[in-house]
Image (tube, grey):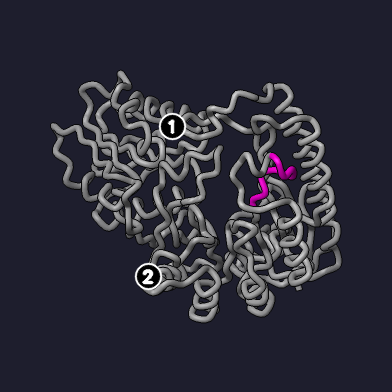
């Protein structure tokens, strides 16, 4: 039957890589089916960013083994990279045909699956810390979406004390610029109107290439060579947002006014314990420059609440600092101890109940900031990329250039197109608009 199920956990990079698996399986004559359907091959692309993500990855493997008793199992991703020994001890794997494939060998997953020896059990891991090149994983179809993720970089060398990712993804590796442009053109041929540039540490793009370059040159080339595509930048460290990049975003109509900037804490002492490379004053200066260059840009911020040693005073500093920042939304997560990281050995844990309360306070602040931003957009006009499905009231929906969810009346021919919309009302959930 040659039917394949692909289960994906975790980040945008994993989602892109799973789309590459789908492309390669389709080209080999296999059919990718939904979970629950009969399958000959099951791929689980795991995550390990938190201990909970690792537990979910193990659970996904066990579920796949139970639901697909005859299928060959292929386990890859970050949890497979750092916990292959743990995976091989799963009782349900005994006597089964499986392969565990590391992140630096993901380009070998589909060939291994297609040529799989039915008597084999194999570990194909490599040494992620010694990886020097990014896996080539071309994609043609990225699900039933109007936008696609475009992975241009892999790996991280920051070694924040709370983060396992440098150990699961290895050093920074970039896709050569010409290959990035080729992938973008493929997406354009397939009808995608928006691409989200993504990587594990996107701001490191190009530093490792034979002809070194950077994220600004990448965005510059992409916006010029594929003007029909609009580009969104997924996440950049505050120290990587330059005036040159902001000028490019301001002057190119197909680079969306949207930045996501990890902060993690609004207290300088906690930032130092996290091994973050900036202070709150430097972060605020970056946000102020972004707001000056792009007054109505969406600016998102990541926050970790309850890091070891975070006192009530530290938390209040974070809350007050965020309140003073002109941002659009907050992504707030409770700190999760991750074995193998420096912070896992810190002894001054914040109790779970206190951590949950702090998360709730910051998430409420984030909702308030988002509502203020949405209300500020009323009576303005924006370019909205219309999605393929209507909302439950039959309205068209999509995101504006500055990442506002907009719903409005319109005909089906507007789906998967960019429409000028006047924003007319905010009802607490989304913004209503009128197509012009």
Residue 300 placed where, x, y %?
A: 69, 53
Identify the image quadrant of the N terminus. top left
Q: Residues within 10 Å of mark 1 (few under 14, many from 20)?
A: many
Identify the image quadrant of the C terminus. bottom right
Frontmost residue, 420 versus 359: 359
Frontmost residue, 432 versus 23: 23
Q: Report whether 325 appears left or right of 211.
A: right
Q: Which residue is rendered at x = 61% and y = 41% of the image?
A: 274
Q: Residues within 10 Å of mark 2 (few under 14, many from 20)?
A: few
Q: Report whether 197 appears left or right of 127.
A: right
Element marked by disc 1: helix
Residue 397: which quarter of the image? Answer: bottom right
Q: Report whether 348 appears left or right of 129.
A: right
> Does the segment drawn in magenta span residue 111?
no
Residue 78 placed where, x, y %?
A: 41, 40
Q: Which residue is rendered at x = 51% and y = 50% of the image?
A: 158
Question: Farthest residue in the top direction?
Answer: 91
Residue 179 has which mark? 2
Residue 151 placed where, x, y %?
A: 45, 59
- Which residue in the structure is indicated by mark 1? 57
Residue 70 appears in the rendering:
yes
Residue 326: which quarter of the image? Answer: bottom right
Magenta range is 262-269
Q: Label 1, label 2: how many angstroms apart (C-alpha)?
A: 31 Å
- The mark that comes first in sequence, 1 or 2, is 1
Tell me if residue 89 comes above or below residue 84 in the rendering: above
Element marked by disc 2: helix
Tell me if residue 385 comes above or below residue 313 in the rendering: below
Q: Which residue is rendered at x = 60% and y = 59% of the image?
A: 387
């Amino acid at each position: 039957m040659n039917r394949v199920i692909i289960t994906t956990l975790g980040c945008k990079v994993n989602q892109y890589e799973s789309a590459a698996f789908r492309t390669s399986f389709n080209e080999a004559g296999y059919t990718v089916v939904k979970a629950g359907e009969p399958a000959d091959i099951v791929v689980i692309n795991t995550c390990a960013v938190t201990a909970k993500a690792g537990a979910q990855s193990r659970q996904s493997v066990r579920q796949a083994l139970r639901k697909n008793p005859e299928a060959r199992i292929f386990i890859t991703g970050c949890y497979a990279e750092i916990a292959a020994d743990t995976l091989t001890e799963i009782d349900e794997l005994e006597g089964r045909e499986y392969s565990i494939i590391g992140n630096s060998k993901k380009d070998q997953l589909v060939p291994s699956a297609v040529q799989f020896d039915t008597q084999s059990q194999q570990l194909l891991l490599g040494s992620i810390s010694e990886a020097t090149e990014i896996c080539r994983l071309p994609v043609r179809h990225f699900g039933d979406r109007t936008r696609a993720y475009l992975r241009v970089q892999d790996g991280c060398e920051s070694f924040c004390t709370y983060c396992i990712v440098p150990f699961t993804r290895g050093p920074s590796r970039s896709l050569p610029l010409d290959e990035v442009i080729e992938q973008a053109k493929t997406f354009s041929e397939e009808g995608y109107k928006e691409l989200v540039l993504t990587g594990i540490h996107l701001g490191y793009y190009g530093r490792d290439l034979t002809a070194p370059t950077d994220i600004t040159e990448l965005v510059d080339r992409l916006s010029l060579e594929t003007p029909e595509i609009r580009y969104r930048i997924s996440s950049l460290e505050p120290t990587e947002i330059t005036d040159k990049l902001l000028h490019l975003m301001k002057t190119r109509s197909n680079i969306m006014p949207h930045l996501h900037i990890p902060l993690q804490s609004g207290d300088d002492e906690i930032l130092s314990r996290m091994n973050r490379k900036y202070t709150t004053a430097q972060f605020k200066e970056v946000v102020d420059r972004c707001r000056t260059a792009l007054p109505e840009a969406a600016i998102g911020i990541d926050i970790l609440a309850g890091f070891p040693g975070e006192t009530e005073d530290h938390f209040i500093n974070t809350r007050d600092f965020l309140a003073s920042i002109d941002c659009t939304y907050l992504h707030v997560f409770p700190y999760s101890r991750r074995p193998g990281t420096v912070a896992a050995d810190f002894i001054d844990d914040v109790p779970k109940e206190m951590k949950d309360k702090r998360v709730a306070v910051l998430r409420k602040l984030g909702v308030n900031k988002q509502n203020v931003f949405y209300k500020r957009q009323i009576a303005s006009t924006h370019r909205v990329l219309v999605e393929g499905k209507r909302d439950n009231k039959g309205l068209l929906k999509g995101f504006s250039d500055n990442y506002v969810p907009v719903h409005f009346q319109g005909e089906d021919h507007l789906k998967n197109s960019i429409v000028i919309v006047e924003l007319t009302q905010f009802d607490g959930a989304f913004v209503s608009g009128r197509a012009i």
